[in-house]
Amino acid sequence: MSEPNANQAPPPAILFVDDEATAVKYFQRAIGALAPVVTAGSVEEGKALLEAHAGSLAVLVSDQRMPGEYGNELLRHARERYPHIVRILTTAYSELDQTVEAVNQGQIHRYIKKPWDITALRMELKQALEMAGLRKERDQLLREKLSVLQTQTVATRIGMIHALCASLIGPGRFQPVETYLAGTELAGARNIEPDWRRMDYADLVGAESERSGTFGHAVGTQLAALRTRHAGRGAADALQVVAEALGDSTVRREGETVVWTSPSALGEFLAKPVGEAVSAQHAAWLASLLWLEEAGGALQFTREGGTIACRAGARAASFSTDRLAIWIERFSESA
């Protein structure tokens, strides 16, 4: 077996998998001038090389009949985990049913029958390498586009938090937004990348609008309940109100501290995937911050090991006009 040099970034390589040593040597002599050739003698060995060197592999050529699993299983494995690699099946046997199945399932790009016509084989591999290069360019452009869309999603969600707070307790009251985003950042909530294989931008906008509307309604309902339940109470009762609103499954009260036993719950609205609903506890958390703002109080977070602690804190006298933009930039950079 030969492998790419791990000490340098090699040019795009071809992985050839065949249990016949003669076929391996023949393939290397015929194709080696086109690209580096990595070889394996079984499906299991081929899977290991894919895992180790997927980034440098452009084409996978596999024989069909080998001890253990057949080659089409390796090609299926590569399609699912390394879709950028161009896949080719080769065999000396007339296994039409398995070949047709592999084509129909998208497991292979080409089927090449043994014995090889060397001129045709080189042409096929040259075209496969060119296709792999085009796929790489396409994927890079797609990543750049999706990065922009993901940044927009982050900004939209942060803006929604600000708009929701303003609509429920009045504009110009940024303290609950600041506290909410500080807790989310401390919890490390970042992952909101949509599944772009299943939705386009219009789908994203629709899903986000419905999700935000549902969340906003839940927060409004929770806030109304807090106002009724805690009428006459003030900022001094903040920790008790928060602990009661969120429940034992999310936080625990320790004297003058509320400990978040599940820190990820702090940032559900920003962090959960598109289309995934936000929990009632998370709506209660934002509603608690809005109630506290009306009561004249504030909270402060600290990370303590694997938990996040929340205590009564000092209110900020004012916030700069670009504070929301600063938060959007911070979250976008780490998304």
Image (cartoon, rainbow, N blue to C red):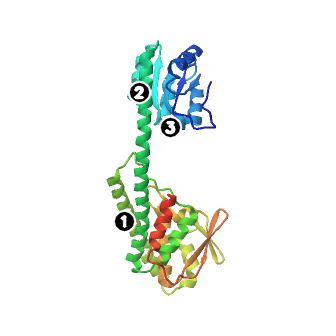
Cα distance in 3D space between marks 2 and 1: 50 Å
The local crowd at label 3, few if under 14, some if 14 to 19, many if 20 or more residues have their Cα within 10 Å, is: few
Kind of residue at badge 2: Gln
Quarter of the view holding residue 246 = bottom right
Kind of residue at badge 1: Gly
Kind of residue at badge 3: Arg
Residue 208's x, y, as percent?
38, 59
- Which secondary structure, mark 2? helix
Q: Residue furthest bottom?
A: 232
Q: Which residue is mark 1?
A: 213
Nearest the camera: 265 or 34?
34
The local crowd at label 2, few if under 14, some if 14 to 19, many if 20 or more residues have their Cα within 10 Å, is: few
Q: Which residue is mark 2?
A: 127
Residue 141's x, y, as percent?
41, 46
Total numbered labels: 3
Residue 110's x, y, as percent?
41, 24
